Image: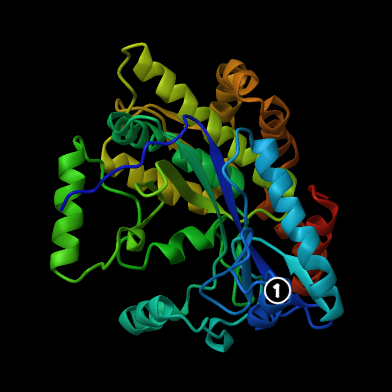
Amino acid sequence: MLLPFTRSQRSSVGIEWELQLVDADSGDLRQAAATVLEHVAPADGSAHPHIHPELLLNTVEVVSGVCRTVGAAGADLQRAVDELRPVTDALRIELASAGTHPFARPTYQKVTNKERYATLIDRTRWWGRQMLLYGVHVHVGIEDRAKVLPILRALMTRFAHLQSLAASSPFWGGEDTGYASNRAMMFQQLPTAGVPYQFERWEELERYVDDMTRTGVIDTFSELRWDIRPSPGLGTIEVRVCDAATNLEEVLAVSALTHCLVEHYSSMLDAGETLPSVPRWFVMENKWRSARYGMDAILIVDDAGEEELVSDTVARMLVELAPVAERLGCAAELADVGRILDGGASYQRQLAVAATGNLDDVVSSMVAEMRAGHPL
């Protein structure tokens, strides 16, 4: 099966952010996406360009256009949120986000009435019904298909650092899971989700897609729900490993780091340099360590098995990538990664709130951060 890759403007960027619809009185999730989307739909009946449905009726997704900078993508997201507010306020719904809701029960959530979602749930059954999860996806444009797989493999040496920074799902169904990102552990239970294969040649990816299609594992490429994947139709690499952030500032911080990493590796290829990679078994271990320990994880950083505290590696990355951020126009957003290092990730703030209050207070803190646009 041939898998054409659309040529894209180098290091263009787009961001997708999944939001929770939270009842303003109970703090639980509301199954109101259909109503919300109906009220924001364009008058001509077309789909809204920046506000989309998702798997569950408790979710709406805000998406940016194809942008040159992370800041411009963030402005698109903010405009979409601002457009949602009058509708959700009138319905006594709060917008919030995090990798999971602290106490909502998966059993009670309703699925959006679309064939592809019904097919997913029918195939995956109990595990599919557990996908009460929210993420941030970052697309970065790649101008040459030959760069896609080397950059993807290089990103696998740092994807767990992104997961740690974005970790925001310590609770599940009212329980403290002991994980910084329980979403990471839940989502990988779906077939074709989780850590991607590290193909050397595009033809190997095409063979894989052909095998998966012929045997009925997938119908379309989009059903490969890897933590990082090529997006052939858009001409991008899509980084999907991050929990949804509780505020726009952290969405843009982690997006800027992702943006800079892709451009950094692309520039290395231009210079004829070999990109880093690590064996799949190290990648798998890093994913688990990051999900379990978050910012306290000690991750494997190279193919020799050297290990380092995630915060130390990230601090060094911020220095190394500063010139890249200047070139991409996201220096301010990249600097906000340092605020996560200093002030803690979302999962740490949620745990601190729960330690002196309860899970209702955690939901309140998520709602407050969403309205403030930055960590509180």
Q: Position of residue 147 (x, y in %)?
A: 32, 29
Q: Say left or right for 345 vs 161.
A: right
Q: Position of residue 57 (x, y in %)?
A: 59, 80
Q: Nearer the viewer, residue 89 or 243?
A: 89
Q: Say left or right for 221 vs 179.
A: left
Task: Tell me the kind of residue under disc 1.
Answer: Leu
- Number of numbered discs overlaid on the protein picture: 1
At a point 26% along the width and 47% down the height, the residue shown is: 197
Q: Position of residue 136 (x, y in %)?
A: 57, 53
Asked if residue 333 is positioned above or below residue 238 in the image, the reply reads above
Asked if residue 111 can be seen in this view, the reply is: yes
Element type at mark 1: strand
Q: Nearer the viewer, residue 28 or 211?
A: 211
Q: Quadrant of residue 155?
A: top left
Q: Residues within 10 Å of mark 1 (few under 14, many from 20)?
A: many
Give the residue pinned by disc 1.
21
Q: Position of residue 100 (x, y in %)?
A: 60, 66
What colour scheme does the image use? rainbow
Q: Quadrant of residue 210?
A: bottom left
Q: Quadrant of residue 99?
A: bottom right
Asked if residue 310 can be seen in this view, the reply is: no
At a point 48% along the width and 50% down the height, the residue shown is: 241
Outermost residue toward the bottom in this view: 108
At a point 21% along the width and 39% down the height, the residue shown is: 202
At a point 32% along the width and 40% down the height, the residue shown is: 282
